[in-house]
Structures are given as C-alpha cells and as structure tokens.
Amino acid sequence: MGFCFFNIKIATESFGPITIAFLRVFFGSIPVLILCFYKKITIEAFSKDWYWFMLIGLINLVIPFFLIAYGVKSVQSNLAAILMSTTPLSSTILGHFYTNDEKFNFVKTIGILIGFAGIVYLFSDNILIDENNFLSAILILLGSTCYVIGGVLTLKISKKRNENVTGSILIWATLILLPLTCIIELPSQKIPSLNSSVSVIYLGVVPTGIAWLLRFRILKKNGLIFQSQVSYLIPIFGIILGYVFLKELITYKVLISLIAVVIGIYFVRKADSKLFI
C-alpha cells in the first residue's frame, strides 16, 4: 500500500483527482469481473440490494479516492501515507460503537491517544504543512475515515460472496464517476505522460481491484480492526519510496509522528489479539 501514494503523486502530474478516482475503479473492476466470470459468480450490483452496493461504492471508493488524489496533489506522498495509516485507530473507535466484539479497553485507548497525538504533532510541521495545503491534509484524513465507515457498511452484507461484493461496488463506483469525469475534468482533451498512465493502471489493478478483494475477505473473516492492520506498513514504505524516488523532504517531526502512529497501532493490535491482560 505504500506504493499507492507514490503512484498517486505521479498520476497527479497528468490527471485530475476525479479522473484518477475513475481510472482506479475502472481498471480495478477488470480483473475482478474476469475472476467472477471465470468462477461463474453472479454479480448482484443491480439486484434488490443495489442500494447497499451503491452506498458502499460511494463511501468506500468514490469519495476517498477523490479526496486522497486531491490532497496528494498538494502534500508530499509520505505525509499522505502517515495520515492514511490512522485507519486502524479510526476502526477501533467505530468498532467499539458498531460491533459487538471489538470494544474499547485500556490498552486500545492508550494506543488511540498515542497514534492521534502523532497526527496532531505532524500538523505542527510548518515546513511541510502550511496554510496552502492544510486543507489537503485534512481531506486525506477524511478519506481514511471514509474507508472505515465503508468497512462498517460492508459488514451489513457480509454473507454475500467477496467477489460479488467487490465487483458490484466497483461497478457502481465506475457509474458514479464516469459522468463526473467527462463533464468536469474532460480527460480526453489531455495527453498524459507515460509515467502517469502506468501509475493509474497500477493503482486500478493492484491496490484497488486485487487489494479490495483481499480487504473484504479479511474484513468478513477477521473483523473491522484486524483488516486495517495493513496500515502498519503504509507510512514506512510511503516515506521510503517518497524519499528515494520523489526526493521528498523528511523532517524530524515526520519521523516522530511516524513512530507515534506505529506505536499506537501496535498497542491497538496487541490489545485486540489479547496479548495484553
């Protein structure tokens, strides 16, 4: 997932945020629908439960993909990776209120406080976050929250097959974004660079299509908090890739924030696995 923000940054060089979101869900839907066809799995995007697929597609794909692409255009990809890594912390909060077996305990609370303290501290980095991109950073945080809300909604249809759910929400996300892309950003009038084109194809196939199949499978089997533990790796790889390939600046506040977020996630994970008593 750390590769995701690195590629979003490259994609913003040629595409607008709505177009990036559309291309992600479009290219992401291709391997999923091929898999469903091969396994003879019925896609229920337009069945009696269509409104669930539409709502999840909107909240779990359309809105966060747009917000993240919009935000990454103005902030470094490594900052976006740290901000997005807060999903386990947000999952813990929502899991307490909307699930029966993922309640708060003392260790989880400490983890949440440490993790979000790191994010608050990150916003004090006046070198990388200023009045020009402060809103962009907030929008990325909001995007991460949408992922968590979408995860809660997905639990409502957890009895349906994973491939069906993934394919159906990708279809709805594509239908929502297609007219917006054509009307607002007019991508057909632009000639994208090769790097940006490769990046959006990668973003669609790997972290959207394939990763979403795995994400919903883990969510249904292991719960809201467990499925978000992949966020452990997001900021680490995000910082490394941003530094190596994009020459992004790493300040001491970025490193301190990273450490705080990782420690916070560690406490939440250990509390959830009942290794703390």
Image: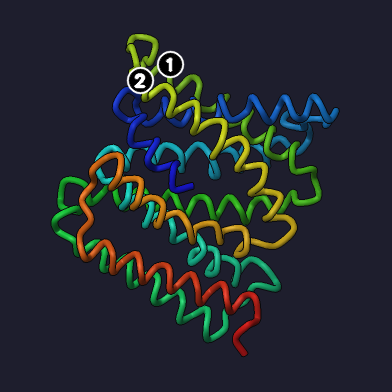
Q: Do the residues labelled 2 and 1 touch (CB within 8 Å)?
A: yes
- Check the image and name the residue furthest to the front: 244
Position above or below: 81 against 7:
below
- Check the image and name the residue furthest to the bottom: 277
Q: Which of 215 and 67 is in front in this view?
A: 215
**Residue 182: mark:** 1
Which residue lies under the disc numbered 2?
Answer: 185
Q: Where is residue 21 in the image (x, y as percent from the top left)?
A: 46, 31
Q: Name the residue located 61 percent from the left edge and 53 percent from the top edge.
A: 151
Q: Quadrant of the C terminus?
A: bottom right
Which amino acid type corresponds to the residue marked 1 in the rendered image?
Answer: Cys
Q: Name the residue located 60 percent from the left edge and 64 percent from the top edge.
A: 225
- Check the image and name the residue furthest to the top: 189
Is 22 on the left or on the right of 153, as rendered?
Answer: left
Is 160 on the left or on the right of 154, as rendered?
Answer: right
Which amino acid type corresponds to the residue marked 2 in the rendered image?
Answer: Glu
Q: Position of residue 55 (x, y in %)?
A: 60, 41
Q: Which of 196 and 167 is in front in this view?
A: 196
Q: Marks 2/1: CA distance?
A: 6 Å
